[in-house]
Amino acid sequence: MRQIRLTEVHPGMILARNLYSRKGHILLASGVRLTEVYLHKLRRLKVKTLFIHDERYEDIAIPEYLSVETQQRAFSILSSTMEKIHNKEAFAIDDISSIASDIVEELIIQPAISIQLTGIATHDDYTLDHSLNCAIYAALLAYSCSFSIPQIKEITCGALLHDVGKLNVDKKIINKPDRLTEKEFGIIKQHPQSGFNLLVKKRWELSSLVAHMAWQHHEKIDGTGYPRGLQGEEILNYARLLAITDVYEAITGCRPYRKAMNLEEAYDIIRSGLGTAFDEHFGKIFLSKMALYFPGMEVLLNTGEKAIVVSLLENTPRHPIIRLIAYPDGTAYSPPIEINLAENPHLSIVNTSYI
Ligand SMILES: [Fe+2]
């Protein structure tokens, strides 16, 4: 099995895992041979990646981050809560806290924690997709930063709700494919304050830190963020952590106004913002855990050999275990050889067609 970007999928390839909509319906079943018609529909649904059968790599296990059941439950709880907020109806917060807790409990039992693209099927509601992906990344980062489990749950809950203020912004502005005017950007910039105003009313049911995450997630360490231009430790640590995963999710996901950025570009953006836009301590941990490769991905080495990523090791996501499959002249390795890149410093990945 291989996980590849939709742009790399060709008609004739066979789907290796069911593809679900966020509402839990099967869009395409495992075993289906993909056709141009299906691919066209998947592009319209903005699906990012697919799991494809490849008999050469049948033994490569691609871990499932979050069970389909939890994804569905998270999506439906988040979606109904957001709808109530949008319609200015009364809403309960217990369900959000409980799904945040379930997400954390599922993620932290994973054998190796690295921050990888979620591979979750997308939906046309960017705020929902963004909030759920962001919550997963924030939980993984908080775990890597050694926060306690109750704190990780609080952070995950805050990440799920951090953009609720956007529900007061006209969807035409949120989904606008062109550059925003100054006036429109001014409207967008109000969402942290309105999110805080909404959530602080729930302070009897929800930690006030969650409301502060919504208020502060666009602040920057050097004081150039909004809405208040807070600096350094004036910004809550939870919000400093969330700011990193918020930007990472935004740039690696598709948006109406641009394509997803590749993982190396995303890595460089976070690295170049350390100490200015982003908290240096959390940012360095994020970069050390951020996977640029994932199992099932084909890569090219500096020696000209081709390999496939077999698995990622904790703490060295840039040095995966790989399986050499072809010599520089294209001759196949027979049998293929598996090596740990961390133990072979003379070898490095120079290219991959899937990121
Ligand atoms: Fe935001």
Image (cartoon, grey):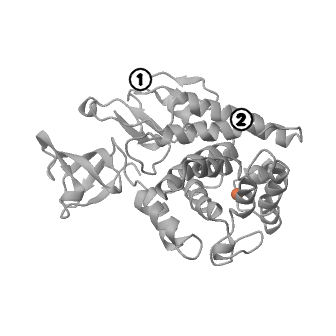
Of all residues, the one furthest to the left in this rendering is 334
> Which is nearer the eye, 161 or 13?
161
**Residue 158: % across, % down:** 68, 51
Q: Is residue 111 visible to the viewer in this orientation of the structure?
A: yes
Mark sitting on residue 95:
2
Name the quadrant containing residue 348.
bottom left
- Ligand 1's quadrant is bottom right
Residue at 39% from the left image edge and 39% from the top image edge: 3
Tag 1: Cα neighbours inside 10 Å, few (<14), some, or many (≥20)? some
Residue 337, percent across and down?
A: 14, 44
Task: Decide if residue 17 is on the left or right side of residue 41.
Answer: left
Amino acid type shown at disc 2: Asp
Secondary structure under badge 2?
helix
Tag 1: residue type?
Arg
Please, is residue 225 above or below residue 39 in the view?
below
* Residue at x-position 84% and y-position 51%: 198
Q: Ligand 1 within 8 A of label 2's CB? A: no
User: Cβ(mark 1) to ligand 1 < 8 Å?
Assistant: no
| Residue 260 in view, yes or no | no
Callout 1–callout 2 Cβ contact below 8 Å: no
**Residue placed at 65% from the left, 35% from the top?**
75
Query: Compared with residue 300, is residue 78 higher up or lower down, i.e. above or below?
Result: above
Identify the residue shown where x is 69% and y is 72%.
225
Within 10 Å of the Cα at label 2, are there few (<14), some (14-19), or many (20+) other Cα atoms? some
Mark identifier at residue 33: 1
Distance (Cα) linking label 1 and label 2: 38 Å
